[in-house]
Amino acid sequence: MRRSPTATILLCCFFSLFVWSCHSAFAQQAPQANEKERGIELYRKGNFSEAVEALKEAVKKQRKDSDAWYYLGLSLHRVGEIEAARKAFEKTISLRPDFAPGFTAWAYMQLFSNDYKGAVKNAEKALALDPKNFESFYIVGTARLRQKQTAEALAKAEEALKIKPDYSQALILKTETLISMFAREREKRIESLGRRDKSKSSDDADDWAKEQSSYSLLKAASESLEAYLKLKPEQSDHAFWSEQLEALRFYALSADDPVSDKPVTSTTTSSRPTILYREKADYTKEARLARVRGTVILMVVFANEGVLKHILVLQGLSHGLTGQSIAAARKIKFTPAMRDGKPTPVIGSLEFYFNLY
């Protein structure tokens, strides 16, 4: 099963950033056993399974070699042994409590395991040792986003980008946080429209101002995502993020033009789309193993041709569940909404629930 695009970035890119930050410090230390040197070289060449075996031998001979434990953790992470990697990083820190990359690596393992409190705690320890540790700002920001603390998440993404403007993961974090902020504002606006319909009152000018304000978040998100795509044109997730950028631009531009034939929310139509067929999104194997729970929320246009368009992820889940939800959404069959007796495009939301029993 495919991982979600964000999870793929996390798994494949994150720890390559650590190597340069600690290489010079390692080089100043006295050489240890050949297994350690060979294991580090194998890791740098991308031979992660072989690196694990060599570094396991190294730590057997040199139990107090923090460098060997650190690279063992990196290698274990690369082969998917997350719990073993976490223990290796814990050992690294116990031997070298002033080593910021070790705390960052440990924090990332906790983030990947949904231990947000532990991730923030260790990332902040890394920042206390190294205030320029942009990876730790990213970890804290991601944890805050998952805890729905969007203002702090955005601030941490910005801090990381101040230090490293081309930090791709911080650009994605900023994009997702701005979308999450928009989703919250949109939900409030829809609730307000529903209450207004019941009271038969209307204030078009006020509605337009609020809509523009919330949709400006999507403009900022599209700019951040565009910067990411320019940095990573060959990434495996490029197609997914390109589609998300197209959707962001569509919704942002729609808010700029208050014409009568643009897609509207279902509260302003005489009837809503009627879903005729819908599939449940299945768990991926990885998500089951990680015991991921939650809800994927998609913003879509129920087009008057009877097809879904402009699928935008307002809230995603890791381990391939966002992708599963999008795939299920594309199979939905429906009859379009009606306005003045004619089919009309409507902006709506779809939710896919994932819960292990």
Image (cartoon, rainbow, N blue to C red):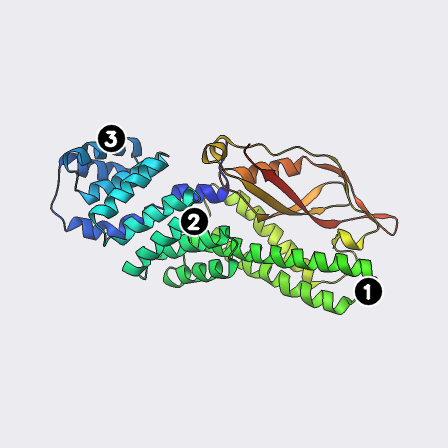
Residue at image mark 2:
116
Give how far across and how far down residue 18 sits, in percent: 30, 49
Q: Nearer the viewer, residue 50 or 123?
A: 123
Residue at image mark 3:
53
User: Label 2 is placed on what type of residue?
Assistant: Tyr
Q: Residue 83 occupies which quadrant of the picture?
A: top left
Report how far apart the C-alphas of labels 2 and 3 lie in the structure. Answer: 30 Å
Q: Label for residue 201? A: 1
User: Label 1 is placed on what type of residue?
Assistant: Ser
As helix, strand or loop, the secondary structure at mark 1 comes to loop
As helix, strand or loop, the secondary structure at mark 2 comes to helix
Q: Are marks 2 and 1 in contact (CB under 8 Å)?
A: no
Report how far apart the C-alphas of labels 3 and 1 lie in the structure. Answer: 71 Å
Circle 2 or circle 3, nearest the eye: 2
* Label whose residue precedes the other's in the sequence (2 or 3): 3
- At a point 49% along the width and 57% down the height, the residue shown is 174
Give how far across and how far down residue 53 sits, in percent: 24, 30
* Label whose residue precedes the other's in the sequence (3 or 1): 3
Q: Residue 50 occupies which quadrant of the picture?
A: top left
- At a point 40% along the width and 63% down the height, the residue shown is 162
Q: Residue furthest front?
A: 357
- At a point 62% along the width and 40% down the height, the residue shown is 352
Q: Are marks 3 and 1 in contact (CB under 8 Å)?
A: no
Q: Is residue 292 above or below residue 53?
A: below
Q: Label for residue 312? A: none
